[in-house]
Image (cartoon, rainbow, N blue to C red):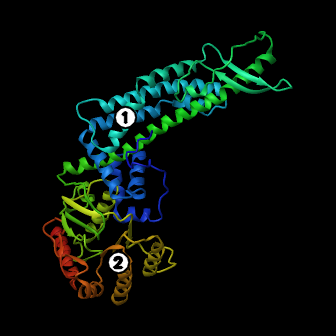
């Protein structure tokens, strides 16, 4: 039995970071989001990062599966925290002494330590079962209903009775009983440990009681006899100790997976609450079987409210488009919107909420980013060559359906060359089935695509600033000006007024 809170068929795996992960965290500004979710818990932060960036939902059914679990836990946060605390407490039970005995070569020592540990773990399983059935509210998600249904069936009165009997027998208070056969030379060839447990439980199967008892005694001063008997005892207990080792490991694995998978949902709920307190909307996205990019009302970047900055939501209608081109004024919110799109897609594919009033999207499987970076400090290559090399390294990882985010890419050369490179790469990616969002100041690039393919591309434009609020981007044709002169005059006029 495993929790399976993130996937109906799989448990949370240990996954190595992808080659693109570091750049994606930096480009989208994900580190502050992970920090806000984890609140200083490094273990929780690692799990959030692992799920969001390395283990997206494999299909729409898995997205809905996770969404249902999240909704359940959000509806009953106190109960969710109690389940998590119980799992965490269970993993703290072994302590340093138990950890020593678990790795001991002595079967009898391991058996004693694991018997005591298993007795406590069974109490924890019983408490967890009762948590699932306590209160008037019941869970509605498939994952949680199945988890607690299995606990009710497995941790029943019959199991508890048999487990207590088995563990009592493993105390070996009455000594050991065994049967053995000998070969023609009088050597012991097989030994079977006898016990008083005859049920079909996982512990009962380690005993096979047959025949009648026989015994012998060893004199108190017979050290060789005592040593031989001790070795025989250890040999007889080896198989039983291994079975109990395995049983303890399985129960601990169950609690470890339960804790880790709950880490993800509780972290997501923490971020959800922080945004709700600031009046920012969050909604579970509706998943499409296939399509272009996304359709969202009031889409925003969660990074702004977490920094205490005002933000304006944007409406994007690109479900039937595989290419979005964003142009317009400097400091107009273009990069912010680009990050908002990337973050919203990652969260949706993780089975979580979208940062919007409403959102519809289709799974893309992976998000890639190509943002401007600092110039190569080693001076081995120029900035434009570095951009092309990064793109070259990324291409083998791309496949139809993934999302590619460009932010001012290929602008480190003249307008004509940069526009041509951007056009060829963008159209090649789109024609290969890759979904592209491109922020650019390359007017020739944007204008040519608008003139030739404006019906197949969503063009968004940042046009101006209202007060201190970020710009709102609206559909519109590219403009030749980036409003740099206006921004220059505004910045320097504000500076002069400050000096006065």
The percent coordinates of residue 419 (x first, y second) are 34, 86
Residue furthest to the right:
185
Q: Quadrant of the N terminus?
A: top left
Label 2 residue SS: helix
User: 321 left or right of 193?
Assistant: left
Q: Which mark is residue 85?
A: 1
Q: Is residue 271 above or below residue 395?
A: above
Tell me which corner region of the image, top left, top right, bottom left or bottom right, holds residue 372.
bottom left
Query: As rendered, which of 255 and 303 lies closer to the eye?
Result: 255
User: 315 left or right of 236?
Assistant: left
Q: Which mark is residue 430?
A: 2
The residue located at (28%, 80%) in the rendering is 441
The percent coordinates of residue 43 (x first, y second) are 43, 45
The percent coordinates of residue 495 (x first, y second) are 19, 71
Tell me which corner region of the image, top left, top right, bottom left or bottom right, holds residue 312.
bottom left
Q: Nearer the viewer, mark 2 or mark 1?
A: 2
The residue located at (30%, 64%) in the rendering is 289
Q: Is residue 205 above or below residue 411?
A: above
The residue located at (39%, 31%) in the rendering is 153
Q: Quadrant of the C terminus?
A: bottom left
Residues under numbered marks 2 and 1 in contact, where contact means CB atoms less than 8 Å apart: no
Q: CA distance from mark 2 to mark 1?
A: 47 Å
The residue located at (30%, 30%) in the rendering is 133
User: 67 left or right of 205?
Assistant: left
């Amino acid at each position: 039995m495993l929790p399976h809170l993130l996937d109906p068929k799989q448990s949370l795996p240990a996954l190595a970071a992808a080659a693109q992960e570091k750049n994606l965290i930096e480009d989208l500004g994900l580190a502050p989001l992970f920090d806000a979710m984890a609140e200083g818990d490094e273990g929780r932060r690692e799990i959030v990062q692992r799920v969001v960036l390395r283990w997206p939902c494999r299909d729409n059914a898995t997205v809905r599966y996770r969404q249902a679990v999240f909704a359940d836990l959000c509806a009953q946060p106190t109960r969710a925290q109690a389940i998590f605390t119980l799992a965490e407490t269970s993993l703290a039970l072994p302590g340093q002494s138990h950890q020593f005995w678990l790795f001991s070569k002595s079967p009898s020592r391991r058996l004693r330590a694991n018997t005591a540990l298993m007795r406590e773990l069974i109490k924890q399983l019983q408490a967890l079962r009762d948590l699932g059935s306590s209160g008037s509210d019941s869970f509605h998600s498939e994952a949680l209903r199945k988890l607690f249904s299995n606990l009710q069936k497995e941790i029943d009165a019959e199991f508890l009775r048999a487990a207590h009997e088995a563990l009592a027998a493993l105390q070996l208070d009455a000594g050991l009983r065994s049967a053995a056969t000998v070969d023609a030379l009088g050597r012991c060839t097989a030994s079977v440990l006898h016990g008083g447990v005859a049920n079909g439980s996982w512990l009962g199967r380690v005993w096979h009681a047959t025949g009648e008892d026989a015994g012998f005694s060893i004199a108190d001063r017979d050290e060789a006899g005592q040593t031989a008997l001790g070795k025989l005892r250890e040999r007889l207990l080896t198989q039983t100790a291994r079975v109990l080792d395995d049983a303890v490991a399985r129960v601990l694995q169950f609690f470890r997976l339960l804790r880790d998978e709950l880490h993800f949902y509780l972290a997501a709920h923490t971020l959800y609450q922080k945004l709700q307190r600031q009046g920012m909307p969050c909604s579970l996205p509706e998943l499409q079987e296939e399509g272009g990019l996304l359709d969202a009302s009031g889409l925003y970047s969660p990074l702004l409210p977490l920094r205490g900055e005002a933000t304006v939501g944007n409406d994007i209608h690109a479900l039937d488009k595989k290419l979005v081109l964003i142009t317009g004024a400097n400091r107009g919110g273009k990069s912010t919107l680009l990050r908002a799109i990337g973050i919203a897609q990652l969260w949706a594919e993780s089975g979580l909420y979208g940062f919007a009033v409403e959102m519809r999207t289709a799974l893309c499987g992976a998000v890639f980013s190509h943002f401007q970076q600092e110039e190569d400090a080693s001076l081995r290559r120029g900035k434009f060559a570095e951009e092309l090399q990064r793109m070259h390294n990324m291409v083998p990882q791309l496949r139809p359906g993934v999302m590619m985010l460009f932010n001012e890419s290929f602008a480190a050369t003249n307008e004509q060359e940069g526009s041509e490179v951007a056009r060829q790469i963008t159209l090649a990616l789109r024609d290969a089935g890759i979904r592209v969002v491109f922020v650019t100041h390359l007017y020739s690039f944007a204008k040519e695509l608008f003139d030739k393919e404006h019906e197949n591309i969503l063009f968004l434009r940042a046009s101006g600033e209202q007060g201190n609020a970020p710009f709102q981007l609206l559909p519109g044709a590219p403009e030749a000006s980036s409003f740099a002169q206006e921004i220059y005059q505004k910045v320097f006029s504000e500076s002069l007024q400050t000096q006065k």
